Amino acid sequence: TQLLEQSPQFLSIQEGENLTVYCNSSSVFSSLQWYRQEPGEGPVLLVTVVTGGEVKKLKRLTFQFGDARKDSSLHITAAQPGDTGLYLCAGAHPGETSGSRLTFGEGTQLTVNP
Amino acid sequence: DTGVSQNPRHKITKRGQNVTFRCDPISEHNRLYWYRQTLGQGPEFLTYFQNEAQLEKSRLLSDRFSAERPKGSFSTLEIQRTEQGDSAMYLCASSPLTGQGFHNEQFFGPGTRLTVL
């Protein structure tokens, strides 16, 4: 079973602080996605990383895929209350670039206090 | 709104009853997925369709669960003889065959929250 472990599970910070969320696995993934989910809603896709070592930026969010494609990180600069939510990483199974299931981590619940 | 839609949004039922959920994917998306999410966990894969063909099923999908996508458009997920352990959020996602779908980028609906009393 290919598992994704996210840390920390819970994070409560003040507005303006920086934070990093980690997503780790012992398995290789062909691609990895980050989603954000609000209570009572479905996950919303933020970014997909595909190449080992790849870095993508989305405004104040920076995503990195590990060189071996087993881990990823999400860094948020100057967090704002609107960043509050459940952040999920999800990996696509290796060798199946299209059409396969996603394996999700348990998520990191981020709360940004004003 | 051209996103994935799911109905109903909430369902409360008594143990032993049957329930059916519907998912309408993004219109040009060939692939459709069902996931289940319990409180404090990430979504878990249940099953996947490409057009009308059900190509993969998780062992989580017991014989009380059945999913269909008869015309390759909308899909239904039925749970027979519901149990309290079936209480969860049931999420549907869709993905195109090419382009963003090449890397399994999936677009989720708002989910159906099932409560079994």
Image: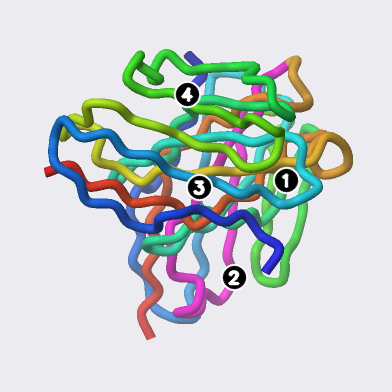
Q: Does the magenta-highlighted stretch encompass residue A99?
A: no
Q: Which residues are magenta?
A: A70-94
Q: Which residue is mark 3?
A: A88
The image shows residue A22 at horizontal and vertical percentages of: 51, 44
Instruction: State which quadrant residue A45 falls in.
Output: bottom right
Q: Which residue is mark 1?
A: A48
Q: Which residue is mark 2?
A: A77
In the image: residue A78, left or right of residue A51: left
Is disc 1 in the same subunit as disc 4?
A: yes
Q: Residue at x 76, y 43 (%)?
A: B29
Query: Residue under mark 1: which chain is it in?
Result: A
**Amino acid found under the numbered disc labelled 3:** Leu
Evaluate if marks 1 and 4 touch, with contact meaning CB atoms under 8 Å apart.
no
Between tags 3 and 2, which lies in front?
A: 3
**Amino acid found under the numbered disc labelled 1:** Thr
**Amino acid found under the numbered disc labelled 2:** Thr
In the image, which disc is placed on residue A3?
Answer: 4
Q: Does the magenta-highlighted stretch encompass residue A88?
A: yes
Instruction: State which quadrant residue A76 falls in.
Output: bottom right
Q: Is residue B46 above or below residue B74?
A: above
